[in-house]
Amino acid sequence: MDASAGNSAPVVFDTDPSRYVHWKLAVEPPLAFLSMDVVEERGLRPGYPLKLNSYDLGVDIELADAVMRLRFEHPEVRAVVVGSARDRVFCSGANIYMLGSSTHSFKVNFCKFTNETRLAMEDASAHSDLKFLAAVNGPCAGGGYELALACDVILLVDDASSAVSLPEVPLLGVLPGTGGLTRLVDKRRVRRDLADAFASLGEGVKGKRALEWGLVDEVVAPSRFAPRTRERAAELAAGTKARPGPGVKLAPLEPERGPSGTRYRYVSVEIDAAARLARLTVEGPAKGEPTSAADLRARGSDLWALRAFRELDDALLDLRFNRPELGLLVMQTRGDAAEVLAADRALWEARDDWFAAEVLLHMKRVLKRLDLTARSVFAVIDRGSCFAGSLFELALAADRSYMLAAEEDDDGGPHVALSPLNAGALPMANGLSRLATRFLRDGVPATPMGEPLDATAARRLGLVTMTPDDIDWDDEVRLALEERASLSPDALTGMEASLRFAGPETLETKIFGRLSAWQNWIFQRPNAVGPQGALTLYGKPSRPRFDWERT
Amino acid sequence: MDASAGNSAPVVFDTDPSRYVHWKLAVEPPLAFLSMDVVEERGLRPGYPLKLNSYDLGVDIELADAVMRLRFEHPEVRAVVVGSARDRVFCSGANIYMLGSSTHSFKVNFCKFTNETRLAMEDASAHSDLKFLAAVNGPCAGGGYELALACDVILLVDDASSAVSLPEVPLLGVLPGTGGLTRLVDKRRVRRDLADAFASLGEGVKGKRALEWGLVDEVVAPSRFAPRTRERAAELAAGTKARPGPGVKLAPLEPERGPSGTRYRYVSVEIDAAARLARLTVEGPAKGEPTSAADLRARGSDLWALRAFRELDDALLDLRFNRPELGLLVMQTRGDAAEVLAADRALWEARDDWFAAEVLLHMKRVLKRLDLTARSVFAVIDRGSCFAGSLFELALAADRSYMLAAEEDDDGGPHVALSPLNAGALPMANGLSRLATRFLRDGVPATPMGEPLDATAARRLGLVTMTPDDIDWDDEVRLALEERASLSPDALTGMEASLRFAGPETLETKIFGRLSAWQNWIFQRPNAVGPQGALTLYGKPSRPRFDWERT
């Protein structure tokens, strides 16, 4: 596979509306109109014109940014019309030539990112009371329909050419990879036999039948489509709670990137290429973080909790897409635990204010992105660290944690501590806190909030995995990292995905566990990606040749 | 891949204790001792001596048979000691050379079958109150520990060499494929970081630490092991409800097998090799099936419901392993719906009797096996069919159903009907009935039990998918079958696995959805099965070489 196919030019995730290429965002409070208008020749890589509003990662990065900015910068917007700026085409899904020419790792990560974006829309609807309406004005295929499925309401124009469809199985020999099948049966609860018929029908379903099968919520005559869209969006907006403005502008992150790592304000990434690992260090807040809801807003995107977690998010995405050869993330922290606990407390106490609530929701999403990162994650809790409260979630998200046990007559070594944010404000995809997931068997041990716990106490409570003393520390940590980095990356990915999400399953865990795992399998199968595979041959004159053996 | 690697000599599933090669079954009511004693040179295929109580499919077929026979033939047995007849070795798991030399399809189906067997043990514990104790008297690795995990209680001998382990990730670059990871965190609720450490440690965990980590339930000194095993098994048995005997002997199925299909008493399989499909026809009962609990028992394994579903089970397994190239199962029925409904009613009314209850539980397991079959399943409801009650579950398990709509002035055509068995007695792996899963959105429509429904009524209620009339019937059904058989088998497998199990997730759906999907992916990856892959090179002097890219 050509190195340019997915991982040569680094992908950059930080953007803002002034730089959007493929989306138009018009704010008309309480509505916003987010319209897809993909520029064919402006794909992330050359080689695949983005025809018919088909998308690549660059298009989705802008969508993810727009959804986040609507939440922070436009509290006056209560419903978003997701539409097309093109006449007679809504969106024809992920670009097939882009997919067909991408590496396996890029395909998998592309689908993961687009899934995270769709889930962020549903998170905004559920938790920020920001509603989405898909205004489907023409053919709406594959990823296009999956985008509509992520909205609260789907309106379909009732004409001879407009249909919703999931043509992946019949035309490409792969699955709809952005949650489509799961949302059909688990979100919209479409009858499974109708879902089966729909998803094996290349041309999709139109008009009244789409409504009857539960694939859309309303079909509208072409002449009525624009006013009815606005009317229905206004109804959605009217049902939401007002969020008193003004919005909070999100400043650009502007990290310094170098070959050996990236330096943000609070986050640094150090690459150890030989050991195939990256050290992510998150600094806690300095003294003087605000405490009241009003002061939190005034601090805006410079607020530590918002800035540090936006940086962490960017760093995680950068590693996922631009450094796939690194198998291990070592999570570290630096700073004063008392300041982290104070920052957490301020957010928790201000949580009825929409801005503080949005900051918490954002932290939650970033931690979920960490949970879903297909790398081993080890937390190293050493002297100078501040794994307290929200930053202790980094240790709880890790596959293992190593905490230094200092001699008793020594300085006491590092400490960890819990804050109210560990108790459910930052749930995992399974709906439980990381603590509740960790202690499914015996329940979360009673631990006073804010109490500093040394290694002995933390281990006794089950909060950390290993606690070597000063004598063993260097060797034990080094050996653990080396050993981990030596194992099969595929087996680790499967193992971690199986161990990280104990407890209840949700739409979200189903998408990442079940659907994505099957899609990854298919993305590896000759029937899709071999020289005669359906994905490989899409748009070419020859028909795919399948190995008919069923598993 | 050599054709002998998995699919040349047909695998036969019907066996009985007199023919066991690898297990010894000793019945000492209320206990039974099921002891593994694998004969090295008696593997299903040549080429992999089954050393150290390692197993292949043949060993697991006997285990599955033993578990079923204990339920039917030995109601006096209330607890089973699963042990080893060998000194100082419990079980070293699935044979690696067997796995390494098998086709992808065989690997996947081997894991599916062993998973179904482990789940059948847990089903016996949960629903037949038959308890299992794993007496681990030596090394217990991989599939060996997964067998122990399927038991209610695990006893480990406390000596220098006995450990439980899941060495698949570090030694083979694959996952423990029989539910091990899922049972660690979801059944035993082992802390995820300890599970991570355990599953990446080739040598496993011994003695007190195994107990502390929650990997076993008791460690016992070698001198106390035999008496303590018996004592603890007797305690398990004492906590169960008595089942008044005598047992019901399961007669052999003795089908006639030919190149174009198989003929059982009630089930027939017709192979259409050109169309790559198999027609499975289940005949309903003749008049004169028994109605009282006593008469049901007296009829024994000749009871229609038991015999027909045992035959169906055998037919499904035969197709899975011996005809992997057939992509489509067409389910048909023949007979008198009234007799099916009467047979269902008799079972339902006698359900407090252990034998009737076992028959229902067996039907449930067979239908689950159908749900899990990685083939498309279409039900064809034509004239002469009897899709009523338990046999209507075959249509509900199908991905789609086609029902003939006859002219009104005609004979009325085929009818379907519901019985009490459709309302929850035969739940899917998700814990819901097939009807409840089908109608997640609007709830199960009110339908009088036993009322015959023609195509128009069945379609209106949402019970069937398509209802062509006499004029269109032949063409529409033929086209549907042809179209289905033309699609990518991999994409269909992924799609069906995603659409069949809407609603809640359970340990069982997690194993088959999440864990198996990841394992199938890994089984396709060069890091495991390529020339330099870890599974390929196991036991050879060269070390695997990995592509380090993470997905």
Image (spheres, coloured by chain):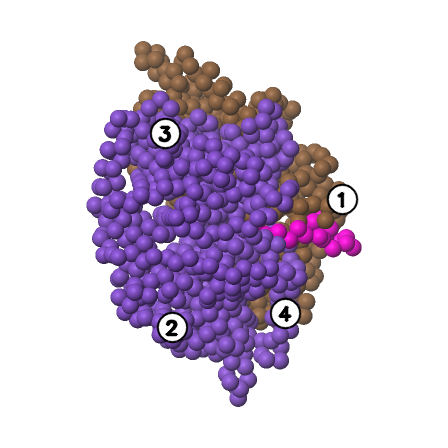
Chain colours: A brown, B purple
* Separation of residues labelled 3 and 4 (CA atoms): 59 Å
Query: Which residue is label 3 attached to?
Result: B87
Query: Which residue is label 2 attached to?
Result: B341
Residue segment shown in magenta: A533-551
Query: Which residue is label 1 attached to?
Result: A47
Secondary structure category for the residue under label 1:
loop
Q: Are marks 2 and 1 in contact (CB under 8 Å)?
A: no
Viewer-proximal residue, A43 or A242? A43
Tell me where residue B445 appears, x and y as whole percent: 41, 71
For the point 36% across and 41% down, the residue is B24
Residue A217 in the image: above or below residue B85: below
**Amino acid type shown at disc 2:** Leu
* Separation of residues labelled 2 and 1 (CA atoms): 62 Å
Disc 2 crowd rating (10 Å Cα; few below 14, some 14-19, many 20+) is many
Q: Are marks 3 and 4 in contact (CB under 8 Å)?
A: no
**Chain containing mark 1:** A
Q: Which mark is residue B478?
A: 4
* Separation of residues labelled 1 and 3 (CA atoms): 64 Å
The mark closer to the camera, 3 or 4, is 3
Decide whether residue A261 is among the magenta residues: no
Dot 1 and dot 4 within a common chain: no
Q: Is residue B481 visible?
A: yes
Residue A42 in the image: above or below residue A2: below
**Amino acid type shown at disc 4:** Arg
